[in-house]
Image (tube, grey):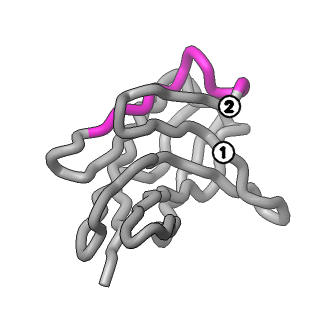
Amino acid sequence: QVQVVESGGGLVQAGGSLRLSCAASGSIPSINAMGWYRQFPGKQRELVAGIISGGRTNYANSVKGRFTISRDNAKNTVYLQMNSLKPEDTAVYYCYTDGSGAGLMVRYWGQGTQVTVSS
């Protein structure tokens, strides 16, 4: 059983900051990439930021320079520091963990956390 649990969402004013956390636990032999997607109402999920086990990161153009992703491999935890938040960042944020074992790669998802940025 694998669990991916997010925390840190909430309501913030434009220009403010939030930090999201996501911890993966359970039977995952090896964790590769971790990261965050977000979903706007009526839209598909879009990648926000990802980080592989070696530390290389990638970001959506819309968040570059404002969001920073990091991870603690020892804790199987990924973080998303969000600064200079804008109302258009309002969405449900989902954490993902890519685990591998026995030649298979599986993506595990968290339940989502709401981020609301007021103008």
User: Magenta region: which residues?
Assistant: 61-71
Residue at image position (49%, 40%) is 12
Locate the C terminus by quadrant: top right
Q: Is residue 51 above or below residue 110?
A: above
The residue singled out by tag 2 in the image is 60
Residue at image position (45%, 26%) is 56
Residue 34 x/y as whole percent: 44, 48
Q: Is residue 7 above or below residue 101?
A: above
94 left or right of 17 in image:
right
89 left or right of 106 in image:
right
In front: 108, or 88? 108
Q: Residues within 10 Å of mark 1 (few under 14, many from 20)?
A: some
Residue 86 x/y as whole percent: 64, 30
The residue singled out by tag 1 in the image is 47
29 left or right of 87 in image:
left
Q: Is residue 80 above or below residue 100?
A: above
Residue lying furthest top in this view? Answer: 65
